[in-house]
Image: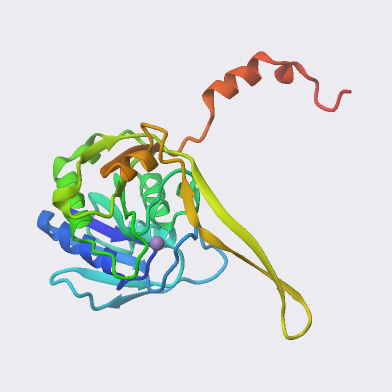
Amino acid sequence: MHILVANDDGIYAPGIIALARAMTAFGKVTVVTPKENRSAIGHKKTMHKPQRADPVPFPVEGVTAYATSEAPSDAVALALLGLVKEPIDLVVSGINRGGNMGQDLTYSGTVSVAFEAVIGRKPAMAFSLDDFSEDANYSAAAAIAQQLVALGLWRALPPLTLLNVNVPPLPLEQIKGFRVVRQGLRQYNDELIARVDPYGRPYYWIGGQAPTGDMSEEGTDLWAVAQGYVAVTPIHMDMTNYAQMRALQRGELERLRPGAE
Ligand code: MN
């Protein structure tokens, strides 16, 4: 088996090294990922400037690695479009420093790796550790990633569907199990910080406290991780709200003549 590994924390982030090492249990591993941190970059496609992908040494034996210049999703696109010659069976992203739950998914570089993979018709899983600390320990999350890849759930995923996995910040023996859950409700505690630059022009910075969220609503990713479970959420790239679509179809919109009062 040949597994492609990427994420958004920079190529030598401890989480990506831990995931690449865990994936070597299944065969060949290639890392193609941004050289620098590109967290919260979302799902980006770089079209108007050149991209770099330089072969670099990687601290796991037998792993081939390329450090790229643009977004994590760009790195996956480069890999799938031919930078990586050998066919890829599975794309995994992570292990991210910090959870990717609720509305985080649209900001997430980690999940965008999996989005790009499923667009390229490759099965994909995204792994995040709900611990943003500098010295977070990725060993339990790496063991979980290895267990879930071995389980082979990814082989049965329908088109444009990926598995988003969030691991609680606990030692392996304290993790209670797995919960298959939906996206919860994040709360962002962002604050607009407005200052003036040395030339007298205003500039803005989005600051504030780290995001929180509703941990009490059972059956969500935020709830599962707060309870000490690994949260597994199948994500579909079809963002259509079907109930709302049907409600709108029942309304007058489709009977209107364009431009009429
Ligand atoms: Mn990140």
Taking the image as shown, residue 99 lies to the left or right of residue 193, namely left
**Depth order, front residue of 94/115:** 94
Residue 219: give x, y in percent of width and height.
36, 32
- The image's colouring method is rainbow
**Depth order, front residue of 87/199:** 199
Q: Residue furthest right?
A: 261
Number of marks: 0
Q: Quadrant of residue 32?
A: bottom left
Q: Residue furthest bottom?
A: 198
Q: Quadrant of residue 260?
A: top right
**Depth order, front residue of 165/222:** 222
Q: Residue furthest top?
A: 250
Q: Can residue 242 be seen in this snapshot?
A: yes
Residue 146: give x, y in percent of width and height.
16, 51
Location of residue 41 with respect to 159 vertically, above or below: below
Q: Can residue 43 be seen in this snapshot?
A: no
Residue 10: give x, y in percent of width and height.
36, 70
Which residue lies at the image location 23% right of the left edge and 67% below the top edge? 17
Q: Quadrant of the C terminus?
A: top right
Quadrant of the rendered image holding ligand 1: bottom left
**Depth order, front residue of 35/86:** 35
Which residue lies at the image location 24% right of the left edge and 34% below the top edge? 156
Taking the image as shown, residue 45 lies to the left or right of residue 131, namely right
Taking the image as shown, residue 171 lies to the left or right of residue 169, namely left
Q: Quadrant of residue 229?
A: top left
Which residue lies at the image location 54% right of the left edge and 62% below the top edge? 47
Residue 209: give x, y in percent of width and height.
52, 60
Which residue lies at the image location 23% right of the left edge and 78% below the top edge? 57
